[in-house]
Image (cartoon, helix red, strand yellow):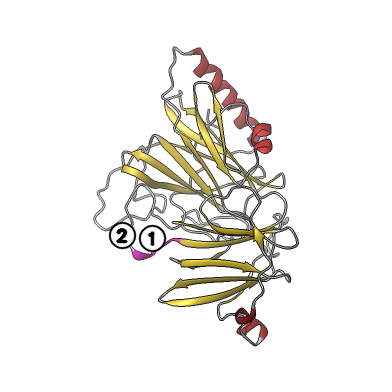
Amino acid sequence: MRTTVVFPMYPAMRLYGQGLASLRSRLVFLTCALACSLGLAGPAAASQLIDRNPGHVKLEVNSHGIALITYRAHGKLIHLIARGAINARLRPARPGIKQVHFKLDYVGGRAAFGHQIWKHFKNTCQPYDGPALAWEVTACTASDGSYWALQNWQTPLPGLGFPPWLIKQKQWWLHLSHWSGAPAVLDVYQDWVYGRHIPEIFGQLTYRGVGIRGFGTTYKGNPTDTYGRLLYLDTHNSKYGKGWRREEGFVASGPPGLFCFGFFKRDPYTGGHPHPPGTPHKKRGPAIGDMYRLTAVGPGVTPDLMWEAPALHRYNSNNPADATYEDAMNTRLDQIRNGWHKCIHH
């Protein structure tokens, strides 16, 4: 469900893909975060990415757990058959075991079954009754009680507020998911760091109580395997301009599935940040806005998650409530870290 929780003096937040009971059990105060940022990380394998810039999307699922996604893209009508995956595999102790993924057939079943099953496909999927989904295109409840969904959002936007200058950066990516039970959980908090002068966002990404993380990243911050998952941070009405702009992409790390991001000025020529030709050699930001949005790619083939909230106000040293709030957030961050060596600054 789409949930709004309001705390006295502090901004409301919206979470998608999580239940109210889960939210209440995890939050005492509303929050924001700091930066294990790895530069603008590029796109990762989504929940699963199936195509780009789709139109007229339709989702059907038969009684055998096979999905038919019909849509228009690349100037043609596509009948995509997807099967063979549900939920996510928890990270194994060592690499080598692949994360779950769909088997995809873009010719309507001819490649997988020898004939175009889409022509006689019997849909048994019922209206969707699961948790609210961010970026939802369509979703349904299968006859076995599991959920299927399609989400569509601008995953590959460039960071540091740059408007897209390449065609691929403007694309809307269509993500397919199939899950049962609860999806992953995105817990997000806001506070201040470095003498309480810098706003930050921190939190954790978990699945079934276990932190979501991979085995490594490239120098640009991209996961090197299918277990790592990227989170994409957007800022609204910041120094970059009006409306939503992509600020950064980063991974959750360590056993907690921890992330943190501080709103500092950033150099487009360091950290693997893509930037358009002719970009001046000077730092951009800080990207402090009036709202923030964080979208996390779901593990395995579970749905993507999104958090959105008004920005936290500037810290007021004369306001005891701000000091109390900051102390609570420092305690919460330490609880999430649980000894993990990143995000140690308060």
Q: Secondary structure at mark 2?
A: loop
Q: Which residues are magenta?
A: 167-172
Marks 1,2: beta carbons within 8 A:
yes
Across and down, in percent, residue 84 comes to 69, 70
Q: Dot 2: few (<14), some (14–19), or many (≥20) neighbours within 10 Å?
A: few
User: Up-down: is 7 above or below 176?
Assistant: above
Residue at 46 percent across and 72 percent down: it is 72
Give the Cα separation between the discs numbered 1 and 2: 7 Å
Residue at 44 percent across and 15 percent down: it is 317
Across and down, in percent, residue 116 comes to 61, 84
Which residue in the protein does label 1 denote? 169
- Whether residue 339 appears in this view of the structure is no
Q: Nearer the viewer, residue 59 or 113?
A: 59
Residue at 54 percent across and 55 percent down: it is 217
Residue 165: which numbered mark, if any? 2
Q: Say if the magenta span includes residue 186.
A: no
User: Up-down: is 238 above or below 45?
Assistant: above
Q: Secondary structure at mark 1?
A: helix
Q: Nearer the viewer, residue 114 or 188?
A: 114
Choose top left, top right, bottom left or bottom right for residue 258.
top right
